[in-house]
Image: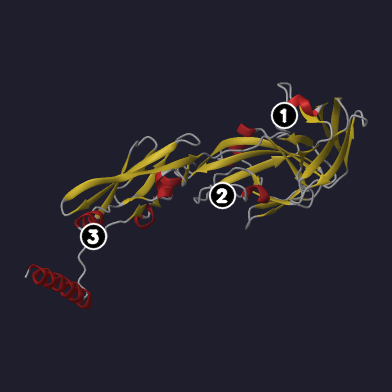
Amino acid sequence: MIMKSKKGKNMLALLLAFAMIVTGIVVTPVNAQAAKKEKKATIAYMYAYGDLALSTQEGYYEKKPYQISVKDAIVNRNKKAKYTFYSCNIKKIKVTKSGKITYVKGKDNQYAKVKVKETYKKKTRTVGTIQYTLVSTKILHEKVTWVVGKTYQLSSPDDAWLTEEEAQMYPDIPLETTVGYWRLVYNTEPVDAQETLKKLNGEITDDTNYEDDNEYLTYNSKKNTYTVKKRGTLYFAFYAKNLKTDKFYYVGSFEARLVDSTEATDVAFEGWGMLDDDDGTEYISVGEKTTYWFDVVPYQYNGTVKVTCSDPKIATVKYKKDKDGANTVVVKGLKKGTVSITVEVNGAKVTMKLKVVNPDFFE
């Protein structure tokens, strides 16, 4: 009787399971239901960790408010909930409850934070904090070298002067553009920054068109690019406009040396090797081959390159381009001793001290 009863119970369980499968009934474990219910809205990674930037150009957001996208900023958002925004520091950033940024101020690379709250069924909770990186209007380099025939542009919205190639190396450039709200004044002599500022703001009568072409540059107003026409030296002063007051303010100055592609203004070893003294002396062992990279300014340089060793009996040197087109010196140690390795280009040179040692030196 016991065996029959047990068999009956097993059969009943199997029939029940089969019926549930046929009808599509699924029993979800209690802990799985709780996990699904607890999935809350959070701040998207890019917004939470400062991957997005805001320009600190004076008066920009007062004139052109920026709307935070709820859809992009919040992950797992509840479409039935209401999201509101609050500034964590009104001295740095002002934002409306609906997420419209109306004021930004701060130093370069500081953070401006906005708190996000969610209200649903009369309950309010903090979702998290949006963190923006502040990018100031600035000049990146006090001296640059440009090549005749090449085109350069003010391509970054934070008004940092970059070549087209350099701009591609800065993926974190903010999306907020300030093109059209700046002036770049240049001359063959250093620019009187404050005097020019008064002219730009109408305090002094001046009919100069500061974007005119001259014998050195051709300006493309649609692309904001400058093409170099001839060799020489130009001095630039850069001004941004406060959109709220409609007045320019001085940002900074830089000097541009205009050269042919066969001229160089600088050459330097890049990184050197891993084995060196405190004074920068490099080490290689007898019989070893080591590659050293070096940079030439401008990077478009295609003139002569001369590489020499002070004592060819101690080490041999050979100049070559690597697979990526970078400049290298391949050095082979022949016997123990100290030498100087010199790279000379048309207009500049650099020297590195090198010691060739026996292999057991590193043991």
> Reading the chain from its start, which is encountered first: label 2 or label 1?
2
User: If the image is split into quadrants, where does the N terminus sit?
Assistant: bottom left
Q: Amino acid at mark 2?
A: Pro
- Within 10 Å of disc 2 (Cα), the crowding (few <14, some 14-19, many 20+) is few
Q: Are the residues tagged 2 and 3 within 8 Å (C-beta)?
A: no
Q: Nearer the viewer, residue 215 or 201?
A: 215
- Within 10 Å of disc 1 (Cα), the crowding (few <14, some 14-19, many 20+) is few
Which residue in the rendered view is the most extreme toward the bottom?
A: 22
Q: Label 1, on which residue? A: 275
Asked if one can make out residue 211 in the rendered structure from this viewpoint, the answer is no
Q: Label 3, on which residue? A: 80
Judged from the image, the secondary structure of the residue bearing numbered disc 3 is loop
Left or right of residue 260: residue 279 = left
Asked if one can make out residue 28 in the rendered structure from this viewpoint, the answer is yes
Q: Which mark is residue 19?
A: none
Q: Are the residues tagged 3 and 1 within 8 Å (C-beta)?
A: no
Judged from the image, the secondary structure of the residue bearing numbered disc 1 is loop
> Reading the chain from its start, which is encountered first: label 2 or label 3?
3
- Who's the residue at 39% across and 45% down the image? 48
Image coords of residue 333 (percent x, y)? 85, 33
Q: Which mark is residue 171?
A: 2
Which residue in the rendered view is the most extreme toward the top?
A: 278
> Reading the chain from its start, which is encountered first: label 3 or label 1?
3
Left or right of residue 233: residue 155 = left
Q: Amino acid at mark 3?
A: Lys
Which of pointers 2 and 1 indicates the residue nearer the eye? 1
Image coords of residue 283 (percent x, y)? 77, 28
User: If the image is split into quadrants, where does the C terminus sit?
Assistant: top right
Left or right of residue 95: residue 228 = right
Q: Are the residues tagged 2 and 1 within 8 Å (C-beta)?
A: no
- Who's the residue at 66% across and 32% down the image? 192
Distance from disc 2 to disc 1, alpha carbons, whole Å, reads 33 Å
